Amino acid sequence: MKKVGVKFCGNCNPHVDTGEIYREIQDKLGQMEGLELVSKDTPGLDVLIVISGCPVDCAERPPGTYREVVAAGESVNRVGCAAAEISEKIMEQLAKIC
Amino acid sequence: MRTRQEYIDSLKALNTVVYAFGEKIDNVVEHPLTKPHVNAAAMTYELAHDPEFEDLVTTTSHLTGKKVSRFTHIHQSADDLVKKVKMLRGISQRTGSCYQRCVGFDGINALYATTYDIDQKHGTRYHERMKDYVKHLQETDNMVCGAMTDPKGDRGLSPGKQDDPDLYVRIVEKNDKGIVIRGAKAHQTGVVNSHEILIMPTIALAEEDQDYAVACALPVDAPGVIHIFGRQSNDTRKFDEMDQGNACFGVVGGEALTVLNDVFVPWEKVFMCGEVDFAGTLVERFACYHRQNYGGCKGGVSDIIVGATAAIADMNGVARASHIRDKIVEMLHLTETVYCCSIACSSQGRPTRSGAYFVDPLLANVGKLNITRFIYEICRLSHDIAGGLLATLPSEKDLQHPEIGPYVEKYFKGKADVPTEERYRIVRLLENMTGGTALVESMHGAGSPQAQRVMILRQGNLPHKVALARKLAGIEEKG
Ligand SMILES: Cc1cc2nc3c(=O)[nH]c(=O)nc-3n(C[C@H](O)[C@H](O)[C@H](O)COP(=O)(O)OP(=O)(O)OC[C@H]3O[C@@H](n4cnc5c(N)ncnc54)[C@H](O)[C@@H]3O)c2cc1C
């Protein structure tokens, strides 16, 4: 089972609804085998999904050797996409690295 | 870190003496006048435990290595300063009003840096005390009211020359256990729902004003402390629901006059005692940290005003008119401009000798001076767009009245598909966020505009600019 954590930026002036993106990811991860959603502070995290409200992506990263998928405003891993597609694109990136 | 509920419960355990409308308020948590401000402050505790916000609202203490509320933190980098501004904007977007904790936050940072400097010059031991105090705040997560402004009496006279010597807080006794202070602090944001008060002098002081050079911390319910809660415009509406506009969080911070009737403060909570030569530095540092905030907190409040204005434009059926869109763009532009100033003065932050980071003072003052104008302009544009019912809407009791309610319902309707009550609520929100007390906070909070102008002139290096001009004009310098 791979451990996946989620980290938010703090949402000072978000361009996208980060809470909604999180809920969508939660749903999608629930349907995927081999991946487990855990606290971002869990030791031995495999992947950290960073959900930043805008392209600045100022979220601090917890220490660790995990891989990252970064949603920052209307983009995932620096490729632009519509807000409604963000959770889907995150899942695509997750599938690539897991 | 305290949870929202722990914060509220902790207030119930205090014996804070609060008066309003000539009566004593026994329970600030439940009293309609103070409850909204308790709720607003409680948001700072709630968001510290919310994964979506904790990255801004919490940080790691440089003193203990533990996770702490950012409101009890000493800035360790320019990034910390930037995060403070972002945090303020984010919280304001949730409350639409002042959540009061920044004043004490700025006070501890200003004192942390200044006590270090005092010790270096005078061989005193204030800085270690200050560190202990910060650790105590980080452990308890107490809310601290930043108490700088004195009543000041005749503004043309220094503290010691006033007819009444108590118009500035002063030391009236020193003994082996501590000091006794007397006077009052005016406009104290959030004091009635804080745990502690951080006293600081309000102006630079001359040698003869040694008794007025005092900085110290005391509990809000210490013997001799009385709080007289200030009136706000429309405050009797706090006994209504819809007519308040922002029923949960109120308007501004809930300010009070705090009277200090010979209050004892033990030495371990005294951070300045007679060092007049550092009063000015402390005031200036506090003012700059505090002016840094406004593009964050008022930026977030403006986000709501812009949102409410766009909503009412839509409800009124004018959202697509070009002049309305243009005015909304202007409101957004002004909001982001004030935010830019706060971000800029933070990212240009630099360390003080104590290690605490300090904002760029010129940019911080420019930012606050913009607030004294741009927030008024944002509110003016919102009034333009919302229409006259901002000033003439009947009360919620009329809307709910069995006989006349249907008339209010019928004749205050905007677009057919928008329920009148929704339009009513948005108008009330705008009315309360853009008039009276809410506006004055932007003018005088963190100092009146002239205070910023003085700092801007001092920091602006005019001779350098004159020299640049003379050089380009081909004027040869003599000698
Ligand atoms: C909503 C709100 C919240 C606040 N919260 C806090 C708080 O939490 N803690 C705190 O300590 N303070 C707080 N303040 C106080 C704030 O810092 C002061 O209001 C501000 O510094 C101005 O002081 P004042 O109100 O006494 O006005 P005044 O000093 O009377 O200023 C009025 C005018 O007189 C001018 N003036 C004053 N003195 C002189 C002089 N010597 N020479 C020439 N012109 C002069 C000013 O420039 C200004 O134009 C708050 C204020 C408000 C409105």
Image (tube, rainbow, N blue to C red):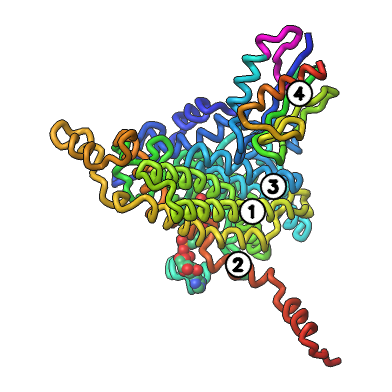
Quadrant occupied by the N terminus of chain B:
top right
Q: Nearer the viewer, mark 3 or mark 1?
A: 1
Instruction: Say which element carries label 2.
Output: loop
Task: For marks 2 and 1, give the CA distance.
Answer: 34 Å
Amino acid carrying mark 4 in the image:
Leu
Q: Seen in the image, is B369 located left or right of residue B312? A: right
- Work out whether mark 2 precedes mark 1 in sequence or the reverse, and give the earlier one: 2
Residue under the point 48% across and 29% down: B8
Q: Return the residue at label 1.
A: B340
- Can residue B275 be found in the magenta stretch? no
Q: Please provide percent x and percent y for residue B109.
A: 67, 48
Task: Tell which subunit mark 4 falls on.
Answer: A
Q: Does the residue tagged 2 have its C-beta within 8 Å of any atom of ligand 1?
A: no
Residue under the point 62% across and 31% down: A83
B353 shown above or below A16: below
Res A54 quadrant in image: top right
Task: Tell which subunit mark 2 falls on.
Answer: B
Pointers 1 and 4 within a single chain: no
Mark identifier at residue B81: 3
Q: Nearer the viewer, mark 4 or mark 3?
A: 4
Magenta residues (range): A29-41
Res B451 quadrant in image: bottom right
Q: Nearer the viewer, mark 3 or mark 2?
A: 3
Q: Nearer the viewer, mark 2 or mark 1?
A: 1
Instruction: Say which element carries label 1.
Output: helix
Q: Return the residue at label 4.
A: A48
B443 shown above or below A25: below
Mark identifier at residue A6: none
